[in-house]
Image (cartoon, coloured by chain):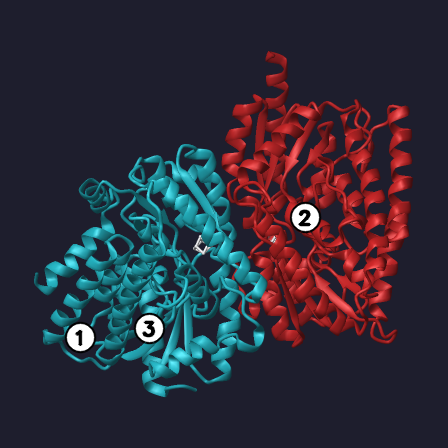
Chain colours: A red, B cyan
Amino acid sequence: MNIQKKMIGDHYKKLSTAKADGKKVVYTFVPGNLNELILSFDMLPVHPEINALQSGMRKKSGDFIMEAEKSGHSEDVCTYVKCDIGMMKKGNIGPTGEKLPEPDLLLLSYTGCFTFMKWFELLQKEYNCPVAMLHVPYQGDGEITESMKQYVVDQIRDTVIPALEKASGRKYDENRLKEFLRSSARAEDDLVAIWESAKNRPSPIDAYFGGVYYIGPIFTAFRGLPECEQYYKSLRKEVEYRVEHKMGPTTPEGELNQQKFRVVVEGPPNWTSFREFWKMFSDEGAVVVSSTYITVGGLYDRGFRHDAGKPMETMAEYCMGCYTNRNLPARVDILEKAIKDYHADGFLINSIKSCNSFSVGQLLMLRELEKRTGKAGGFIESDLVDPRYFSASNIKNRLESYFQMVAAKRAST
Amino acid sequence: MGLESLVQRCEDLCRDLDFNYVKEWKKKTGSKAVAFMPIYVPRELIHAAGMLPVGIMGGGDDLEIIRGDAYFQSYICRIPRSTIELGLGGKLDCMDGFLFPAICDVIRNLSGMWKIMFKEKYAKYLDFPQNLGKSGKNFYVQELQQLKADFETISGKKITDESLGRSNALYNENREVLRELYDLRSRYPHQILTYEAYLILRASNILEVSEHTRLVRDYMALAMKKSRPNRDYVRVIVSGAFCEQPPLTLIRALEGSGCYIVDDDWVLGARYVLGAVSGSGDPLMALADSYMDKTVATGSRHEDASVKGDYLIRLVRERRADGVVFAAPSFCDPALLERPMLQDALTAENIPHTGFKYAENTGQIQTIKEETGTFADSIKLWGAE
Ligand code: SF4
Ligand code: SF4
């Protein structure tokens, strides 16, 4: 955790002095991001969702959202966008208290979420800088076709690379890119080993609340860098140590060794009451053994690795492979497999008001999964960064009765 | 047929959630029908396979939602739940396939729900390029080729260059006549009432294209003969209603509040191509080109910020509109995220605007009517600020 904290702190520091240091800045989204390519141009990435998430955790998001709503944004739309817009309107002071640099380029990787497109259109109006559109086709039929792949490869070559060249003033350097890709693959191997450790009893990790910390570096500005590799190497070692000593994960309440319930979770967490939410699980002795949120930046556990041998194709496959770019039947299959592989007692859906990309269809997923696995499913509702939509008592009640149901079901089988 | 009965026929078609026209058409022709969600679907390809394209725009305010609510959280717009309700109620059994265009994440995920819930039926998510360069066109052409192959399988009929060329021409004619209808309404909004024009347009979702073209012509002739009072109303454009539709009572109320609607973006599925699909060369390429170069701007299609709002402003000028009424379905991300950008563009040009949200079964007609009425009054009193 400390290594990660330092990595993030250093990154924000670099961002705060980017302009003075002559560094160019590219804003882009987390799912399916092209971090290795951005690094190869020596540019610094900013991920607006991460700023929103961090603002949520630091209890600043409520004010930012109100600010955006005051300026004409509807209460109905995604709060990540509003949090970001509000932050910008209040001076663009990032979560660590330092000013964020304006973008030299908005790399609109339109992956798995429609809102991304509108988000950068809105930012472009404010910053008056170029947008490079990378449209990532959705896996509507549950597969990546040749034409989809070709489309993404063509866009990377014909739209994204020229835009990065122009913004950075550097030429595209494939060898450099390949080095970053190779490093990514090594970190990805370690990450998968960490996820799979949750098959043990007790599980040494929490793959949702704890998982959020584990995905931080690899989903954001660090994938491809030596410090990222190092982070996963040491994390893996620590997890292996825990397995060996039959230790549970560290939670805000200490180590969770008495694990009464093993659950799989679908949907992002709430950030404004993150620790309180986590505590509701640990109080019940519940550990999350797998979650879909930790795959929004790639389904590594299904075998994907960045492949330096085919840099363009591998980036295209990565973009298209993220969880929210998969269709509903595929998402149900992924969850079903996780429930079985991780010997879960049940599954829970945290339905996020903001997020149509995740939320539409979740009630059907609930039915399907109950039918297919025979396990108890639970459904709770909250929001990512809008504190108005986190009703602690309501969620706690629901969770308590859910875990009672799981216990009853287990006792009857 | 007289004017009233013609309009009544269209209203009946719009309200007929048993899709009797489709059933009869299928019986008569022995052919099939393919349904599609609101916009950017190339109906020409369905037609060229000898099938009937049927636009589905939810259930309106007639449909009681019994099962649909169990599939969607309260913060999701209404059109997917009424569509699921129609599906579960067996109302869509007469459709042999269903297309879900890539206009938002709701319809996107609905396509997957359909695959799970109605396994035996063809359901296809139709992606179209947001990158409008060469790569986008290549991708779109392949999407169209896939659709063509799928439609040939469903219909058991080959789509030839001739048949597609013919369908392109028929839909060009239909768009042309709809443009005439819109031009006419803009010139004589007291003769071509929006409530009627809407129903006439809406009938394009169901009727076979040639029949619809005739119907539009008949309507224009009849409506222009009628003597109707010319009122002192303001001229407005309605924007943001391209997917879930407002209830018919709301459309009527808007007009009744003192606004002549001189352009709008409802039922865009019939009008998203601006101009004609080219009649020369490969007809599939012509269809692809029309999407790339001649397509209406909506919140669902990416645009560079430098041109954001240009389309709407141009429309305001062309139609000599006094203002814009933003009308968007509640929880509609594309329309609601687009709205502040369009509002800013209008404000910069001194064009008055107002806005509200609705649902297809909205009951708050009176409140909305009062708001648009006040908007109309303020324009009359002060004009553009
Ligand atoms: S809609 Fe969901 S995926 Fe998209 S930006 Fe909002 S929270 Fe993220
Ligand atoms: S009303 Fe808006 S959000 Fe709902 S399905 Fe239509 S476009 Fe999507």
Give me the chain letter of mark 1: B
Residue type marked 2: Glu
Helix, strand, or loop for circle 3? strand
Q: Depth check: B4 or B46 in front?
A: B46
SS assignment at label 2: helix
Would you call the spot at circle 2 few (<14 residues within 10 Å), some (14-19), or many (20 or more)? many
Q: Pick whichever, B136 or A91, lies toward us.
A: B136
> Residue B379, located in which quarter of the rendered image?
bottom left
Q: Nearer the viewer, mark 1 or mark 2?
A: 2
Q: Which residue is tagged 2?
A: A317
Tell me, yes or no, whether dots 1 and 2 are on the same chain: no
Say whether marks 1 and 2 touch (CB < 8 Å).
Answer: no
For the residues marked 2 and 3, what is the alpha-carbon distance in whole angstroms?
A: 43 Å
Check contact, mark 2 vs mark 3: CB within 8 A: no
Q: Position of residue A389 (x, y in %)?
A: 59, 49
In the picture, residue A90 is in which quadrant? Answer: bottom right
Q: Nearer the viewer, residue A268 or B52?
A: B52
Name the residue rendered at 90%, 48% in the picture: A3
In this rendering, the answer to whether B146 lies above or below A115 is above
Q: CA distance from mark 1 to mark 3?
A: 15 Å
Residue type, label 3: Asp
Q: Which of labels 2 and 3 is toward the front?
A: 2
From where the camera sits, is residue B255 visible?
A: yes
Q: The disc labelled 1 sits on which kind of residue?
A: Gln
What x and y, as percent, mark residue B93?
Answer: 31, 37
The residue where tag 3 is placed is B263
Residue at the image position 39 percent from the left and 61 percent from the top: B283
Q: Give the residue displayed 75% in from the left and 62% down from the top.
A: A46
Which residue is at 75% across, 73% downward?
A167
Circle 1 is placed at which residue position?
Answer: B191
